[in-house]
Image (cartoon, rainbow, N blue to C red):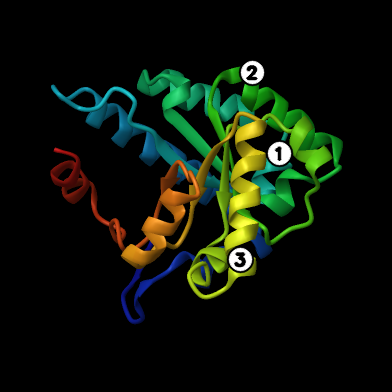
Amino acid sequence: MRWRHPERGVVPPNDFIPFAELYGLIGRIGAFVLGKACRQLAEWTSRDGWPRDFTMAVNVSGRELSDPELAGRVAEVVRRHGIEPARLCLEITETALVSERGDVQETVSALSKLGVCLALDDFGTGYSTLAQLRRLNVDILKIDRSFVAQINRSSRDREIVAAVTAMSHALWMTVVAEGIETSQQFDTLAGLDCDQGQGFLLARPLPPEAIATLVG
């Protein structure tokens, strides 16, 4: 999501999302993004030759996760646009997902039962433990970019990524590396059996029509 401000130009989400959370606007923004994403996913997957396993990922804030009505809204949007729940991936930060609050855990459980994919975002920046990871209904673990950035210069970071990847595979999770910017990082991650990646090396943020060209 980008805010096209008339004076400031394109404002990245890191600059305005914290204020949206602070002033109680994140729910409205989240609902808008979810609807827009599902509508676009439905349009793409209706095209001839479009990959049937194509997945759309949408970030969910910690405040949204605390809303007991979130799962119901997600179910309604998925139904309205006629998409398979498994084609929608909700990305939730490590800090929010490992919360001990009951409402968060109930929401996560309801989303999992709905059939949507759940991703643990920015792993390594929070304080989750192996025991917590085992009880979470998470399909994907995303390794934070801070580890990827130094993976070819720090043997410690490389060993951490290798250990996290092996641990995730043991828990039947798919591993995604964030922030891949060089071919050397890509090759190292592939050698460590990382499943997927994202970053400027692969593609920068693009409008829908450019994505369609890229996929096609």
- Distance from disc 3 to disc 2, alpha carbons, whole Å, reads 35 Å
Residue type pointed to by label 2: Lys
Q: Is residue 37 left or right of residue 43?
A: right
Against 170, residue 165 (above or below) is: below
Q: Which residue is mark 2?
A: 113
Crowding at dot 1, Cα within 10 Å, few <14 / some 14-19 / many 20+, comes out as some
On the question of residue 56 being in view, the answer is yes
Residue type pointed to by label 3: Asp
Q: Which residue is mark 1?
A: 67
Q: Residue at x 39, y 37 (%)?
A: 56
Q: How many dots with numbers?
A: 3
Crowding at dot 3, Cα within 10 Å, few <14 / some 14-19 / many 20+, comes out as some
Q: Which residue is mark 3?
A: 157
Q: Is residue 98 left or right of residue 43?
A: right
Disc with the residue nearer the chain's start (3 vs 2): 2
Q: Nearer the viewer, mark 3 or mark 2?
A: 3
